């Protein structure tokens, strides 16, 4: 069975966590909410709650086929935790699918080797991604190897479609 981790922290963009969560479950994938702590209720920017199934310190890259990193302000909180950085870094090193939307690119800049990779994001973090060595483009969705990126909630159908396509190969 395909297993997907969706990272959670407070102030995630509600749609960017929930839309992939339900679409990936609909495809028959096992989808877990992985936070910096287990069993914690995190709240999105618009107040929608989600409870973590696991903490990043309790999971490994071997446990999952993909990780989804929603945007909002959550990625700035995620990257303050060594275990979360290690999990995403290990997913990158193993070439597992890493999908980041909106401000989720902050985690790519902090945890992944994106030098020479083509990515997109919310325009405000373009500089962060370019400083990390990526080539930023303004597109709905960009797939470069195992990394999938998108800009904003309006891109969710394209973003999630590419995740599904990658995981069904």
Image (tube, helix red, strand yellow):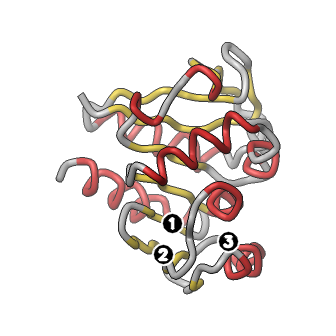
Tell me what residue is drawn at x 82 percent, y 43 percent. 80
Residue 96 spot, x, y in % from top left: 38, 49
> Residue 118, relative to residue 91: is it above or below?
below
- Where disc 1 sits, the SS reads strand
The image quadrant of residue 41 is top right
Say which element carries label 3. Answer: loop
Which circle's residue, 1 or 2, is located before the other in the chain? Answer: 2
Q: Residue at x 50, y 77 (%)?
A: 117
In the rendering, which numbered label is found on residue 149?
Answer: 1
Q: Which residue is mark 2?
A: 140
Q: CA distance from mark 1 to mark 2?
A: 8 Å
- Count how many numbered circles sit on residues in the image: 3
Q: Position of residue 81 (x, y in %)?
A: 77, 38
The one nearer the camera, 34 or 73, is 34
Left/right placement of residue 31 relative to residue 120 reads left
Give residue 148's position: percent from left, percent from top: 44, 63
Mark 1 or 2, closer to the camera: 1
State the residue at coordinates (40%, 28%). Answer: 63
Disc 1 from disc 3: Cα separation: 10 Å
Q: Work out whether mark 3 precedes mark 2 in sequence or the reverse, and give the earlier one.
A: 3
Residue at coordinates 55% horizontally, 86% vertically from top-left? 137
The N terminus sits in image quarter: top left
Residue 165, picture quadrant: bottom left
Across and down, in percent, residue 154 comes to 54, 65
The reply to whether callout 1 and callout 2 are in contact (CB within 8 Å) is: no
Q: Contact (CB < 8 A) between labels 3 and 2? A: no
The residues bearing labels 3 and 2 have C-alpha atoms spaced at a distance of 10 Å
- What residue is pinned by disc 3? 122
* Residue 147 left/right relative to 16: left
């Amino acid at each position: 069975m395909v297993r997907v981790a969706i990272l959670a922290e407070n102030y995630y963009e509600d749609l960017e966590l929930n839309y992939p969560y339900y679409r990936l479950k609909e495809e028959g994938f096992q989808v877990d909410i992985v936070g910096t702590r287990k069993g914690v209720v995190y709240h999105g920017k618009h107040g929608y709650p989600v409870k973590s199934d696991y903490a990043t310190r309790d999971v490994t890259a071997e446990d999952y086929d993909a990780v989804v990193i929603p945007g909002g302000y959550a990625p700035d909180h995620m990257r303050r935790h060594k275990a979360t950085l290690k999990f995403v870094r290990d997913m990158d090193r193993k070439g597992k699918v890493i999908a980041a939307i909106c401000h989720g690119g902050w985690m790519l800049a902090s945890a992944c080797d994106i030098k020479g990779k083509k990515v997109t994001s919310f325009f405000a973090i373009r500089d962060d991604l370019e400083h990390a060595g990526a080539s930023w483009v303004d597109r709905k969705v960009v797939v470069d190897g195992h990394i999938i990126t998108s800009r904003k909630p309006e891109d969710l159908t394209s973003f999630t479609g590419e995740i599904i396509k990658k995981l069904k190969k």
